[in-house]
Structures are given as C-alpha cells and as structure tokens.
Image (cartoon, grey):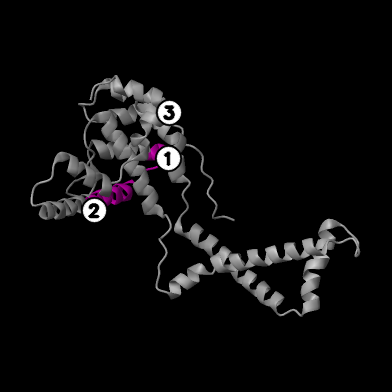
C-alpha cells in the first residue's frame, strides 16, 4: 500500500518566520509582520494539511482499479447466483442464515433467511452497477473529471500564500521574471521561504508559482470577457458592484483568508487593529 500518504502538520518556527517577514515589501507595517507567525500556524493547522493530504493521479487510479475489480467480481457472483436452480437458490438463503443465527435445521427462520439473501443480492447489483459506471461513461464518450494532481496541490498552496502575502503586506502578489527566466521579487522570496519550511527544499517552487500565475491570468481573462459581454448586452459600462459580482463568479479566493474572521476570530481582531 505504498501509495498512501503520511502527512504531518507543518510546524513554522519563529526563526523561519522572521526570515519570511524580512522578505516582505519594505512598506509592510511591522504590526502586521508580527502576526505572520500566528497566521501561518493557523493556516498549517487545517488548510495546508488538507492540501498536502490530497492524493495524486496515480493513487486515485489505483483505487479506481480496485473498485472496478470489486464491481466486476460482484457481477460474476450475480451471474453465478442467477444460474442456480430453485433448490440451490433456497440453500443460499437457508444455510447462511443457520450459520449466522447458530440455529438448527428446524429452528431457522426461513423468512429472515430470504430477506437477508435478497438484501445481499440487491447490494451486489448496486455495487456492480456503480463501479462499472466509469466504463459505461467512457463508452458513452463522457470523461470523468481528472483527479487532483501535483499542479492542483501547488496551485492551492500558492493561492493561499498569495492571499496571506497580500493580507500582511497590503501589496498585490505578482510573478516577476528576470532575463534568465528566474522568478524574483518580494512575493517570490516570501513563497520560497515558506516552501522550504513545508517541503525541506525549494524544488518545485518555480513550477508552483508558474501554475498559480497561469491560473490567475486565465481567471482574469474570464472576468474581462464576461464584463465585455455584459457591457454589450446592457449597452453601458458596468458599475463597481456589477464588476464585483462577475469577479466573485470567475475568480477563486483563498478559503483560509476569506474565512479567517469566522474560523480564527482572535487573530482577526488583532488584524483589524493593525493598519493596512
């Protein structure tokens, strides 16, 4: 069972977070920087742990094959039961009930035996139908939604880090690339420091930032296209409130930062007392 994930919660030390705070823009308010340790520890407690616990495509495919095999075996068993004559079919109910209840031949409840057998067959039919469904969908041209993969996990982590960066620094996170194709800047430095604390090295950080930036660009294009379409239909420019409605529809926001007021009220009160 080597595909199972063993994920422990990340522990952010004060020394490591001091280095992260130093990577923030110079305009960051010190009072907000001082809350970074509490913010990252709150994030690691639930959201980051959930991201790291996500399985990759290989693990999901392995489980799907197992379930399909169980569905196939259930279908074979149903066919075997269907081929029995009346006497044998009765025995499939009666003898298991004797074994289950520990009763003698004359003490066994025949009605209960039949009910147990029929319920079991009904469950087998459902099992065979459900876990052969992916094959039927493929035959009908329906492609199931791809399972989470490395890109998804990287994006979710960077989405949260971008929101945390903006929450603390007050600046919008951006991906900056130098002439050699390397990422640089406050956001890059901040995410690299956090990445080391999570994974023990910086491998994959450039890929993660690119995945996040590409998804942000895709969402921005979707917002702009929807705004243009709505403006044409209404024959006017959209108000700020209408813009917000469209952005909320097409943009993804960090659940951690969006819900910090409700999930971490003490931390939220401290944030409210600091300037932006």
Asked where in the image residue 168 lies, by quadrant, the reply is top left
Residue bearing the label numbered 1:
48
Residue plotted at (17% across, 49% down):
179
The N terminus: image quadrant? bottom right
Residue plotted at (27% across, 20% down):
274
CA gap between label 1 and label 2 equals 24 Å
Q: Which segment did they paint magenta?
A: 195-219
* Disc 3 + disc 2, Cβ < 8 Å: no
Residue bearing the label numbered 2:
218
**Secondary structure at numbered mark 3:** loop
Residue plotted at (49% across, 37% down):
9
Checking the image for residue 13, the label placed there is: 3
Label 1 Cα crowd, 10 Å radius (few <14 / some 14-19 / many 20+): many
Q: Looking at the image, can residue 56 be seen?
A: yes
Q: Looking at the image, can residue 203 be seen?
A: no
Above or below: residue 221 compared with residue 43: below
């Amino acid at each position: 069972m080597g595909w199972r994930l063993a994920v422990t919660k990340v522990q952010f030390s004060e020394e490591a977070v001091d280095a992260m705070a130093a990577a923030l823009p110079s305009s960051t308010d010190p009072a907000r920087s001082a809350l970074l340790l509490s913010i990252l520890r709150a994030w690691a407690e639930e959201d980051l742990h959930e991201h790291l616990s996500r399985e990759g495509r290989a693990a999901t495919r392995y489980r799907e094959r197992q379930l399909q095999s169980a569905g196939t075996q259930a279908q074979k068993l149903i066919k075997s039961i269907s081929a029995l004559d009346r006497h044998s079919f009765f025995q499939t109910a009666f003898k298991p009930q004797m074994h289950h209840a520990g009763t003698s031949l004359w003490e066994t409840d025949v009605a209960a035996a039949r009910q147990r057998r029929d319920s079991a067959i009904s469950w087998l039919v459902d099992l065979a139908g459900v876990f052969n469904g992916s094959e039927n969908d493929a035959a009908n041209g329906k492609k199931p939604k791809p399972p989470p993969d490395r890109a998804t996990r990287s994006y979710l982590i960077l989405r949260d880090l971008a929101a945390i960066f903006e929450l603390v620094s007050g600046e919008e996170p951006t991906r900056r690339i130098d002439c050699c194709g390397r990422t640089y800047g406050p956001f890059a430095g901040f995410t690299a420091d956090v990445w080391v604390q999570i994974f023990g090295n910086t491998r994959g950080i450039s890929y993660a930032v690119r995945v996040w930036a590409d998804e942000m660009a895709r969402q921005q294009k979707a917002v702009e296209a929807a705004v243009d379409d709505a403006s044409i239909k209404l024959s006017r420019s959209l108000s700020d409130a209408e813009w917000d409605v469209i952005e909320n529809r097409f943009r993804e926001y960090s659940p951690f930062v969006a819900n910090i007021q409700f999930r971490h009220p003490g931390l939220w009160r401290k944030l409210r007392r600091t300037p932006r």
